[in-house]
Every structure is written in structure tokens, then in C-alpha cells.
Amino acid sequence: MEANRFLTLLQQRQSVRGYTGKPVEVEKLTRCLEAARIAPSACNAQPWKFIVVDNPELKAQVAASTSGGVLPMNHFTRQAPVLVVIVRESANFTSKIGSAIKDKPYTLMDIGIVALQFCLQATAEGLGTCIMGWFNEKKVKELLHIPKSKRAELIITLGYPSSEEIRPKIRKNLHEICSYNRY
Amino acid sequence: MEANRFLTLLQQRQSVRGYTGKPVEVEKLTRCLEAARIAPSACNAQPWKFIVVDNPELKAQVAASTSGGVLPMNHFTRQAPVLVVIVRESANFTSKIGSAIKDKPYTLMDIGIVALQFCLQATAEGLGTCIMGWFNEKKVKELLHIPKSKRAELIITLGYPSSEEIRPKIRKNLHEICSYNRY
């Protein structure tokens, strides 16, 4: 793949907070899930489960769990035709001991990685996503029968964006975040 | 971008554990860093710094920190012409309070995301990478003058792969990791 074309895709991925009512085609959703399935993880533990929420009544209840609290209401979660909840699972033995010895929760980095693979594939499909880590986790776990011992880490909205505008990204300059051979 | 073409890129990204001696072109490295720079993060906190290690003596010392312990020796880290160390920085205020209230270390998921953006761009450039979370962090922090209060979370190798083989990915089946409307 042409390198500049890929960088353009990364620039096109943005948090989409407005969706048309158009449903997501099954084959597109399947490719997004496939992109997530083949994501890398520490010691190949694959410590994740995805719950696709597309039942309208249930989806409305899960969407309601993303509103309220100290952050602004997330009304767009009701518009999105699909929500995907990412549950963090236990790591395998190798990843667990590595994580314990090095005091690094590898599985959390793995969750970030798998969420991004899903969202980038969605962008390539012409779909919009928004990754949310702020929601009423207890409520979501009840609604979806997620075992109490597990963590529902992220909810991703998926659907056709209501606007084609690609907003400029507000980011630190490279010289603020990058140095050579020393911090 | 054509969706299947992007999925192919995701399939091409793999942990590369053998490198030719060919140096990485500055413009390719720059685009990989740009891909990382524009990565999404919780509340746009961008809680990361990248240290590019390309000084041969220093690189050999950092590479040595990835060998030993309970995991096999990582000899390929000495072959790679560039190592990139990702340091986790403090989040901004919004991300911090969200993280505290929800008991979710968002910055760790952010580190996974930013590492993947770097590695996927590298794949698009024809370069190979390997993300490593297992190394002597104390030693790396000393070598690169990273403040004691910070965490060096990941080291990424970057260079031209010594083999063009794309290995089949060993992953769980989709039905093992995905369900609809309930766990």
C-alpha cells in the first residue's frame, strides 16, 4: 500500500459524533471485526471480547449509559446503528507473569490496540466511529450480562457519519513529543 | 481507501524479528512519527513522548536491555537500525479525573493506540517493527535520561525485514471473541 495514502487514512479517522440513520452492512461490520480479531497483543494473549449491540431497545439502553456525569451528554450514541462493547479478558500465563514482574498492565495497552484496528478498518469502509471510555460500566455489564469479575473498558459507536467534513487535528508539535537519543 | 486493501495491510503487519542492515530513510521515519503524532487519545491528552535511538553505541546498550530474564533473548533488537522508546506522560486534567472516577488507566490504552499507529505506518512504508514491553526499564531510563517519575512503557524496533514472508496469524476464531447483544 502506498505510504502517503495510508497516512491520509489515519488523518481521516476522527471521533464521529453525528450519524445518519443508515444501517451498517453486515459485510462491513464483519471486516471491522476481522480487523480487530487479527490485532497484535502482548504474548498473543488476545485478552478481549466484543459485544455487538444492534438490538434497538437494548442499544438505546446502552447508549443511555454513556450520558450524564461530569462530561457532556453523548446524544450521538443513540443515533449510531451499532455499538460495540469491548470487554477486557484475562491474559495468558506468559503475558500475566511478564505484566506482574514488570508492573505493566499489558492487557490495557492491548485493548487500545484492538479498538484502533476496528476503528481504522471502519474508516476504510467509509464508516465513522467514536471510542468512549466514559460510561456507566455497572449498568452496561448488567444490560449485557457481563460477568462481575470482568471490565467493560470501551464502547465504540459505528455508523455512517452525518457530515463528510474532516476536522483539522489539534495535536502537539512533533518537537514537543519527540527527541533523539535522550529524553 | 479501498477497504480490502487496508485489511491486507493489517494482515501484513507482524512482529519482525530479523532485520537487514539497511538504514531507514529519514522521510519514512518522519512519516511514522507523524502517524503516531496524530493518534487519538482519551480527552486528546496525548500522554506520550518518543525517543528515537539511532546512535549506534547507545542503541546497542538499549538493545542489550531487552535481553535476559525469563523470556528468550531478543537478538534482533541489535540488528534493527532504529529503536523507538515510548514514554508514558501524565494525562491532562479531564482525562485524569475521568480515569480516577472510572478506575480506568486511559493513558495505558492511549500508549497501545499510539504504538499501533506508528507500526502500521511503518508497514505501509515497507518497514518492519516489533513492539516490546519486556525490557530492563531502569537501565533504559538511565541510558536515555528519562526522569525517574516516568514510565518507559514500550520499545519498538524499526528497520527493513530480512525476510519477505508474511506468517499466517494464529488467532482465536471470531465466534470465540464476539457475540451479539449479550456476553
Image (cartoon, coloured by chain):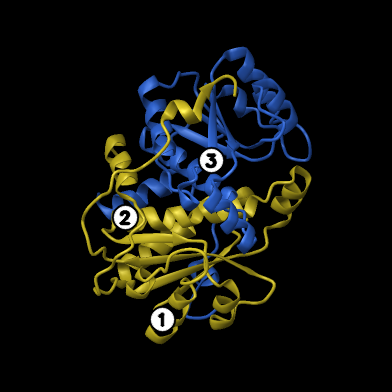
Chain colours: A yellow, B blue
Amino acid type for the residue under numbered disc 2:
Thr
* Mark 1 → mark 2, Cα distance in angstroms: 24 Å
Residue in the image at 52% along x and 61% along y: A133
Q: Give the percent coordinates (x, y) of residue B182.
A: 52, 80
Mark 1 or mark 2, earlier in chain: 1
Residue in the image at 36% along x and 37% along y: B124
Q: Determine the chain carrying the residue at label 2.
A: A
Q: In the rendering, which numbered label is found on residue A123?
A: 2
For marks 3 and 1, give the one nearer the viewer: 1
Asked if one can make out residue B59 in the rendered structure from this viewpoint, the answer is: yes
- Asked which secondary structure carries label 1, the reply is helix
Front one among A160 and A73: A73
- Asked which secondary structure carries label 3, the reply is loop
Q: In the rendering, which numbered label is found on residue A99?
A: none
The quadrant in which residue A84 appears is: bottom left
Amino acid type for the residue under numbered disc 1:
Ala
Looking at the rendered structure, whether the residues under marks 1 and 2 are on a common chain is answered as yes
Q: Determine the chain carrying the residue at label 3.
A: B
Is there a contact, CB below 8 Å, between mark 2 and mark 3? Answer: no
Relative vertical location of residue B178 with respect to residue A1 in this rendering, above or below:
below
Relative vertical location of residue A124 with respect to residue A5 in this rendering, above or below:
below
Q: Determine the chain carrying the residue at label 1.
A: A
Residue in the image at 64% along x and 57% along y: B100
Badge 3 is on which residue?
B15
Density class for disc 3 (Cα within 10 Å; few <14, some 14-19, many ≥20) is some
Name the side, left or right, on which A62 lies relative to B60: left
Looking at the rendered structure, whether the residues under marks 2 and 3 are on a common chain is answered as no
Badge 1 is on which residue?
A60
Density class for disc 2 (Cα within 10 Å; few <14, some 14-19, many ≥20) is many
The quadrant in which residue A175 appears is: top left
Name the side, left or right, on which B70 lies relative to A123: right
Extreme residue in the front direction:
A70
